[in-house]
Image (cartoon, rainbow, N blue to C red):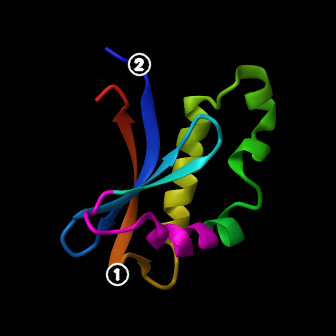
Amino acid sequence: MSDTTETGVLLSDVTNGTKIGFIRFASSGMLVYQVIKAGLHVFAFKPIDRLLNEQWRQEPLYKKHASFLDENKKLPEEILKQEANSCADFLNALERPLMLGGNIVEAQVVFVDSAR
């Protein structure tokens, strides 16, 4: 059994719950965008990435938490959870609907066993 989990923000269609995409919070301090819906290209995340860069975080997570990375070579799970919660709260609080690939989506923090 693996004790490794991946922390991320799942983006699901608000009308039917279909899983559209996933923003993984990597222990390196990077955000990794992953497409779930077939036929959708990763470039569909460009507006969300721009929004996060301009309004949610003023610097990349690997810079914001550089002291943890220098000491441990990876970010602790607790920091990843805090950042994912902050990101989901930000995305869900937007005045306009959050769109991904033509779908109105909502954000939810999830933890996935990476051994799957």
In the picture of the structure, the residue carrying the numbered disc 1 is: 102
> The residue under label 1 is which amino acid type?
Gly
Residue 63 lies left or right of residue 106; in this view the side is right
Name the residue type under label 2: Asp
Counting from the top left corner in percent of width and height, residue 87 is at: 55, 58
Q: Quadrant of residue 112?
A: top left
Residues in magenta, as a range: 36-51
Return the residue found at the far left.
16
Mark 1 element type: loop
In the rendered view, tell whether residue 35 sits above or below residue 7: below
Quarter of image, res 115 = top left
> Does 64 lie within the magenta span?
no
Q: Residue 69: where, in percent of width, then height?
A: 74, 30
Q: Earlier in the sequence, mark 1 or mark 2?
A: 2
Is 38 covered by the magenta stretch? Answer: yes
Which residue is drawn at the image coordinates 68% and 71% (left, top)? 55
